Image (cartoon, coloured by chain):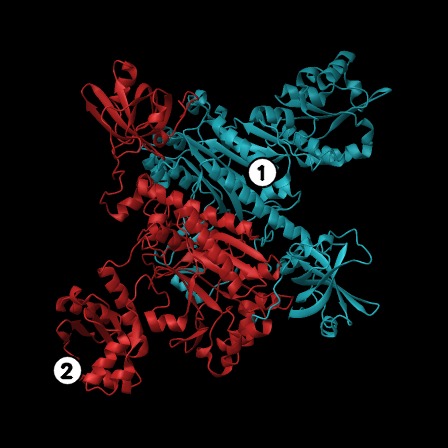
Chain colours: A cyan, B red
Amino acid sequence: MSSMLLKRTHMCGTLNSENIDETVVLNGWVQKRRDLGGLIFVDLRDRSGILQIVFDKDISLEAFEKAETIGSEYVVATRGKVRKRQSINPNLPTGEIEVFAEELQILNVSETPPIYIKDDDDVSEGLRLKYRYLDLRKPSMQSNLVFRSKVSNIVRNFLMEEGFIEVETPMLTKTTPEGARDYLVPSRVNPGKFFALPQSPQLFKQLLMVSGMEKYFQIVKCFRDEDLRADRQPEFTQIDCEMSFVDIDDIMKVNERLLQRIFKDALNIEMKLPIKKISYKEAMERYGSDKPDIRFGFELVDVSGIVKNSSFKVFSSTVENKGFVKAINIEGYEDAFSRKDITSLEEVAKTYGAKGLAWMKITKDGITSPIAKFFDEEELKNLLEITNGKTGDLLLFVADKLDVVTNALGHLRLEIAKRLKLLNPNEYSLLWVTEFPLLEYDEEDNRYVAKHHPFTAPVDEDIALLDTAPEKVRAKAYDIVLNGHEIGGGSIRIFSSQLQQKMFQVLGFSEEEAWEKFGFLLEAFQYGTPPHGGIAYGLDRLVMLLTQEENIRQVIAFPKTQNATCPLTNAPSLADYKQLKELNIAVIEES
Amino acid sequence: MSSMLLKRTHMCGTLNSENIDETVVLNGWVQKRRDLGGLIFVDLRDRSGILQIVFDKDISLEAFEKAETIGSEYVVATRGKVRKRQSINPNLPTGEIEVFAEELQILNVSETPPIYIKDDDDVSEGLRLKYRYLDLRKPSMQSNLVFRSKVSNIVRNFLMEEGFIEVETPMLTKTTPEGARDYLVPSRVNPGKFFALPQSPQLFKQLLMVSGMEKYFQIVKCFRDEDLRADRQPEFTQIDCEMSFVDIDDIMKVNERLLQRIFKDALNIEMKLPIKKISYKEAMERYGSDKPDIRFGFELVDVSGIVKNSSFKVFSSTVENKGFVKAINIEGYEDAFSRKDITSLEEVAKTYGAKGLAWMKITKDGITSPIAKFFDEEELKNLLEITNGKTGDLLLFVADKLDVVTNALGHLRLEIAKRLKLLNPNEYSLLWVTEFPLLEYDEEDNRYVAKHHPFTAPVDEDIALLDTAPEKVRAKAYDIVLNGHEIGGGSIRIFSSQLQQKMFQVLGFSEEEAWEKFGFLLEAFQYGTPPHGGIAYGLDRLVMLLTQEENIRQVIAFPKTQNATCPLTNAPSLADYKQLKELNIAVIEES
């Protein structure tokens, strides 16, 4: 490009009838060209929007003749005068005006693009990712990326105001025992050794607390080599925070104000504080989920005590065998579900392990249900009372082991809310879930593993249980949930070397193993470690929810496919023999 | 930690005589404990500073007895009343006050730390990095990291104000042909294939321009697997920008205002704009460097024409053989360099390839020089005239091939300025260096390689030279230099598919090779690529210079050693056989 470029004076989308009679220069892409009545109309697009340019022989023959050669996605610069538009286009913000071109520069040509540059084209995601640079020209993708950038900036400025310091932690770090699968990076200088890409800056942020930084944050890439789902990527971005001399309340308070700021500045939504809190135990009991969507009811009700002596053997024998019977009341939607619909709901319940789904409709004419006959009047009365069953309601029952009942009904209430279109995307409902279990038993490994990570502190009064009933120990851990999605989580950390060693012991590590894997942390803890805790948010997921997208790839500029590849660059790719030799590694064939 | 924690009401360093009689709670670390006259004095440290706490039996026996047990780096919380200090300590900002403790909580104990928590301890860097969490407690390291965080925030907010969007580009990407050595990441899902960690987001930011983002930035980790120097790390942080519809001036202007903002907001220094510009050619001729430090003179002067017929064979035969003789005039410092000093300067010149260093002192009594006798009066007169030689000056000469002369004198002027302490660290001198050569000839590979990278645009009027004299083609490339250090660089990019293919051809790639390596870029360029260009700054180096540190490890929380290892975590480390097997790779022994 020479210095002759006609440089823009305005962005297309910012012009309106107030600019009439001004001479402007615009730079952008040809969205569309139409030749009509001896004139050429071009929709010119830049990041701000679209504006109509008119080429008229009588104004500039040279510009007109150039305009005759241009097509979709040509890059042009044009100078002209803003005029009131003959036929106003109410669908365009700039629809009241057009620019009559006096000069046109064709900056670059374009082949016919393989995908349309519009939001509603129905093209495969594979093609979208291969031509991502075209896909990103779409207004929705542009606005998603602009929004994401804005959210990051809001977060950073809020945390800086609050005295947090952004510290960059290493990307080339040590493999994480007790975590997910690591991405490894062979070291050339240290043959046979490997760095790992961080799954999170967990240990480094704790070390920063040991080092007296007091308030740390970072917006940082993290990596997990796990099989992908719709909302997972091999690399993802975390808003990572840690604070010293705090307890759970302090962390919650600053994070509630952070979330309030995000909603206000990014979406102009006033979020009322404090955010509701619910314990893990209560969340599981009432919603069948540790990340409940509380925009709607349909809560789980334990009816085991009422049905345990009924003649419905499925229920009574379940209770007899230490199982549970729970119900959800789909209040007011009795007539929204046909028998066929209920059968399809039963299929859903079965995918979550339930053996079946019992139901009762409470109609004007009484209870309609294949199982009503098994209950006496007293039992039916008690069932309606405990479930708050009224005329017009639908009761659904699952009987099984507790975790199956919980899981099946938890998913069922979500599925039903979706079918009933009760999930208002413009309603943002936040919830803290607290007091998670510290440990869970891993049947495969035959030992306890940390539910969050091994650095999470137990609730003080439960510490004694570490020896007697580890599964009962509650953690000082909390998740923040938005409309049924976990958007962040954290904990108060162990900050005593002794308690940390105890924790490793409960996880089945010998003292030697613990020191081998986490020696630097245990050692650091001996030199004056303050009480500390923190939180991490998944930025991709947060932005996905705030933009009401269904897939995190919609808010990532260059995502990977489900297969962890990039169709645009064809990464990953084969390496040269020379490269591998320098790294002292070889590829081995799959057996 | 229980909820019983005495939570701080103030930070130590923020208290002063205005707080006298207030009851405060402080949290922090014991910097020092002294027992004196029946009282215990504790210097308490937090991120903000240090404050003296006094324990007096008569105020609280319990607190006093606890205080008797605490030592350096214990973590404590204390409540007490602010009083005017008996013996004022003028070296402490809080030196006029002290706090008489009414309550003390010992939050954590500490072993005796292996390094002192003070700036002037003289401990090896190995030990500092092993105990980095203690090293980072030092005031200088804390303030460096706070400063770095501040600079990042200033940059981000400036660029957001200017309409730039921060877009995150992938870390798991494709290996870079024509770059430095990549770090590779084996793919588990795609056996035998590898990701590469990005050396820079160069191609992605160009693709973002193709996608119409128009103004992009990112503060991002980049990776190069090269042997390390004092100011190199395997991973480093780049401030990365790209803009569309711009020429060099547009990029310079916005970056000058960015730099002005950084100096103003981070250092309260008013930087005058515009920043001086110098072409690469002129920089090499006048300063012998493409990143000249212009805080001082001692410019190179070509004296070849004057000495070519002299009887000093070293000079005349050099010129005869197409070599050059250049001089620098160390104005006013004739008497600052003894013969022994000059011999040591000659040693410096020799390390840069010079065969020797000739000199002339212009004293009150005339010219003192071992070589003066070889020049006639006319030649001496002309030498003094062209070098502006006056009484009190020292002239230094190197005769050799041009690049040796340039390199040796370029380094010599720097070395001399250092010895003369002319480099005022509080003077920040910025300079644009422009019109770099597009290509340089790689003798080893026997072909041209790109001096910056293969996407840099040639100066328009030099394009024809690509066929006839590639080495003469100037690039639309620029570096920004601060006090002799390159802190950033960039270019206008090629945006035409044809010119890009031409460039690859000049670099010796067949069309097939070019498409294999850069096909996605060449393809993208066919769909309406705007003119674009950008810049990238090395954040680590910039912060190092602004904090007047000599080593980038001073501004990185957890750096690697020269050997690319982390003494704290012992990364890199051996991988499990199971991990490697999943990745389909094996370690091969060095032969």
Label ID, residue B225: none
At x 56% / y 33%, what residue is drawn? A480
The CA span between labels 2 and 1 is: 79 Å
Q: Position of residue B93 (x, y in %)?
A: 30, 33
The secondary structure type at the circle numbered 2 is helix
Give A546 or A277, whichever is nearer the viewer: A546
Report the residue that reaches farthest toward the top: A378
Give A400 or A258, whichever is nearer the viewer: A258
At x 73% / y 55%, what residue is drawn? A121
Mark 2 belongs to chain: B
Q: Position of residue A336 (x, y in %)?
A: 81, 31
At x 60% / y 51%, what residue is drawn? A562
Quadrant placement of the N terminus of chain B: top left
Q: In the rendered view, tell whether residue B28 sits above or below residue B117.
A: above
Residue at image mark 2: B373
Q: Which circle, 2 or 1, is nearer the viewer?
A: 2
Tell me: A547 left or right of A588: right
The crowding category of the residue bearing disc 2, from other C-alpha atoms within 10 Å (few below 14, some 14 to 19, many at least 20), is few
The amino acid type found where label 2 is placed reads Lys
Give A26 or B156, whichever is nearer the viewer: A26
Which picture quadrant has residue A511?
top left
Mark 1 belongs to chain: A
Q: In the rendered view, tell whether residue A324 sits above or below residue A552.
A: above
Q: Position of residue B292 (x, y in %)?
A: 35, 65
Tell me: B357 left or right of A272: left
Quadrant placement of the C terminus of chain B: bottom left
The secondary structure type at the circle numbered 1 is helix
Q: In the rendered view, tell whether residue A80 sits above or below residue A209.
A: below
Which picture quadrant has residue B275?
bottom left
